[in-house]
């Protein structure tokens, strides 16, 4: 096999997406994953792709909008190249409106979305009987329904990306292998820990999340977001709920009473799921950069390399645009990284 133009370290969503975009542009790519594809939070079950609110616009929100609008084409190409279903659908999302102040705010955001979302998606206010049997009754009688949110199945999406890469001639290697060409590090929590240890200060860490998969078929319905709990319909007839956010933990991969409490809360919030059996419990640590935004650009310790890390909670939604911007930078030297995403924002 030809010597690779690029080596991507890390088989999570950022590493896989960057490797895929480089491969699509004709580069010879070697992807090296130390453990398994989708290790850590990228191998999860929740997969909520949701936008920031359409107000107080900034570069982070604009970047995310671009990425969510790119998602359909991105995942369609992955599915075609891999022969696997990543579970993507632009399904929309609904939320209850708790009081009159919240209703006024929702209406203001609906106006903002008309401009900020460029007519490509809507933030709508609808009656709470519009999704009877799925969404609970709202205290105000109204729901927010946005048409920008999407869903995918994280583990399936990573598997599809890895297969697409191999089908297009890229190397996907597990374990310890040599790097070739330009190196892009997308090593998740381990990479943030290394940065922090070397610099002698915290620039990011892992935040544990727990979620559950229930046997309840909502595949044709939008996501629900109720009291900080995501309800994500998957195309295989299951519904994921998530997630906790734990800064202190002993084992990032074990589930405990906090997930039990989350499941109880979800059943209370959404009575439609009261008797749905739990078929999978999941936990992992998610990489959170100090700035809370993705950390992308020139690696702060190794200036001959690049870094893509810190996709805390929004990694799958940001991945198509992160991959595009990183490929532009690594291949052409074109730097379109927002200031809030540069590594120095967390240093």
Image (cartoon, helix red, strand yellow):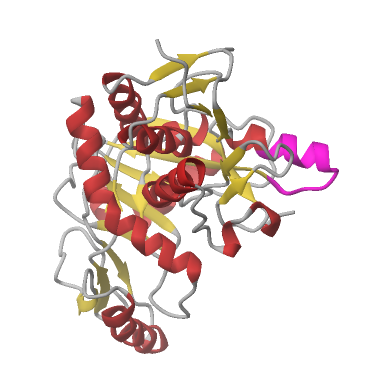
**Which residue sits furthest front?**
332
The magenta span reads 192-204
Q: Say which residue appears at 41% left-offset and 46% top-offset.
A: 319
- In the displayed structure, would residue 4 be above or below residue 139? above
Asked whether the viewer can see residue 28, the reply is yes
Q: Is residue 201 magenta?
A: yes
Front residue of 38/1: it is: 1
- In the displayed structure, would residue 87 be above or below residue 106? above
Location of the C terminus by quadrant is bottom right
**Which residue sits furthest right?**
200
Image quarter of residue 200: top right
* Residue 28 pos. (x, y %): 40, 24
* Residue 215 pos. (x, y %): 25, 36
**Does 208 sit left or right of 61 as displayed?**
right
* Residue 22 pos. (x, y %): 39, 35
Q: Say which residue appears at 59% left-offset and 63% top-offset.
A: 340
Asked whether the viewer can see residue 278, the reply is no
């Amino acid at each position: 096999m030809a010597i690779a133009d690029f080596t991507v370290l890390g088989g999570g969503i950022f590493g896989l997406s960057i490797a895929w975009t480089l491969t699509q542009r004709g580069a010879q790519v070697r992807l090296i994953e130390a453990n398994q594809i989708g290790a850590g939070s990228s191998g999860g079950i929740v997969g909520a792709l949701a936008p920031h609110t359409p107000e107080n616009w900034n570069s982070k929100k604009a970047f995310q909008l671009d990425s969510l609008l790119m998602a359909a084409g991105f995942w369609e190409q992955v599915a075609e190249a891999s022969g696997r279903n990543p579970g993507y659908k632009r399904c929309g999302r609904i939320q209850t409106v708790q009081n009159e102040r919240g209703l006024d705010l929702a209406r203001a955001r609906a106006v903002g979305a008309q401009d900020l979302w460029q007519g490509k998606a809507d933030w709508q206010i609808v009656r709470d009987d519009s999704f009877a049997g799925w969404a609970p009754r709202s205290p105000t009688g109204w729901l927010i329904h946005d048409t920008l949110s999407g869903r995918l199945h994280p583990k399936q999406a990573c598997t599809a990306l890895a297969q697409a890469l191999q089908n297009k001639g890229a190397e996907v290697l597990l374990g310890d292998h040599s790097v070739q060409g330009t190196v892009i590090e997308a090593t998740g929590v381990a990479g943030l820990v290394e940065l922090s240890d070397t610099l002698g200060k915290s620039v990011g860490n892992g935040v544990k999340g727990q979620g559950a998969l229930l046997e309840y078929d909502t595949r044709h319905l939008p996501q629900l977001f109720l009291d900080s709990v995501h309800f994500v319909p998957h195309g295989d007839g299951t519904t994921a709920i998530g997630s906790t956010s734990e800064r202190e933990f002993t084992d990032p991969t074990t589930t405990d009473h906090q997930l039990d409490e989350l499941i109880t809360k979800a059943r209370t919030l959404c009575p439609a799921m009261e008797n749905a059996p739990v078929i999978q419990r999941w936990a992992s640590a998610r990489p959170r950069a100090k700035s809370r935004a993705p950390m992308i650009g020139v690696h702060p310790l190794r200036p001959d390399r690049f870094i893509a890390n810190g996709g805390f909670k929004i990694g799958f939604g940001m991945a198509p645009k992160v991959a595009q911007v990183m490929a532009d930078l690594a291949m052409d030297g074109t730097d379109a990284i927002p200031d809030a995403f540069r590594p120095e924002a967390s240093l």
